[in-house]
Image (cartoon, helix red, strand yellow):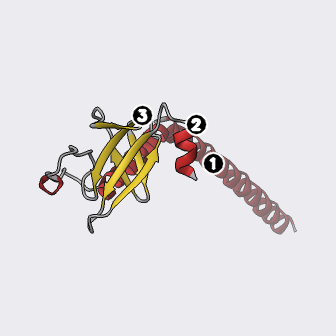
Amino acid sequence: MRDFFIKTFQKKRAIKMILINRDKRQLTKYFVPDEDGNFTWGQQTYKIDQEPYYDSKGFPTYIFKYNNTGPINANPNINNVERTYMTPSEYNTAIHNRMAQQLFNANDTGEDVGKISMFVSIGTLVVVIAAAYLIYQEISNVLEILRTVEGG
């Protein structure tokens, strides 16, 4: 059903993907790639950074092998394809790590340390003033007791 909606309503942006599994089965699915040219099928992310190898009923069609993140050439020697430097699962993990790193960098500013140190300084000042006031009150009470003892 999802393929029907993509083929019908998003035909200008849709791509056709053929995945060749370990057991040589071919799975076909339609996707709308991200702005980066990536798309995710299950837990694996694939990248499209090349021109389509062939056109299938108006859709750019890419062929991927289960252990290759980039599209392979549509020739009969699919078994002779060189493996890329990472598997689709590793590529998916790398993308998520990059996004997490960007989030941490966006939130990592020097103002947070300044605010925390300001609040700690104010808290320390309040504690010192409260302690000085309590000590002054105690000294006043002790002096009153000493005066009553001397005078009486």
* Residue with the mark numbered 2: 9
**Pointers 3 and 1 in contact (CB under 8 A)?**
no
Residue 54 location in percent, x, y? 29, 37
Residue 85 location in percent, x, y? 18, 51
- Whether residue 117 appears in this view of the structure is no
* Residue with the mark numbered 1: 123
Position of residue 88 in the picture relative to residue 121 (left or right)? left
Q: Residue furthest right?
A: 152
Task: Using the numbered discs, state the Cα–Cα distance from disc 2 to disc 1 in whole angstroms.
Answer: 60 Å
Q: Residue furthest front?
A: 57
Name the quadrant containing residue 99. top left
N-terminal of the pair, mark 2 or mark 3, is 2
Residue 103 location in percent, x, y? 46, 43
Position of residue 30 in the picture relative to residue 135 (left or right)? left
Position of residue 34 in the picture relative to residue 119 (left or right)? left
Asked which secondary structure carries label 1, the reply is helix
Crowding at mark 3 (Cα within 10 Å: few <14, some 14-19, many 20+):
few
* Residue with the mark numbered 3: 58
Q: Amino acid at mark 2?
A: Phe
Crowding at mark 1 (Cα within 10 Å: few <14, some 14-19, many 20+):
few
Task: Using the numbered discs, state the Cα–Cα distance from disc 2 to disc 3 in whole angstroms.
Answer: 13 Å
Residue at horizontal 49%, vertical 40%? 107
Residue at horizontal 73%, vertical 58%? 139
Query: Which of the labelled discs sits on residue 131, or is there none?
Result: none
Position of residue 25 in the picture relative to residue 132 (left or right)? left
Residue at horizontal 60%, vertical 44%? 119
Asked whether 26 or 131 is in front, the reply is: 26
Q: Amino acid at mark 1?
A: Gly
Name above or below for residue 21 compared with residue 91.
Answer: below
Disc nearest the viewer among 2 and 1: 2
Task: Using the numbered discs, state the Cα–Cα distance from disc 3 to disc 1 in whole angstroms.
Answer: 68 Å
Q: Amino acid at mark 3?
A: Gly
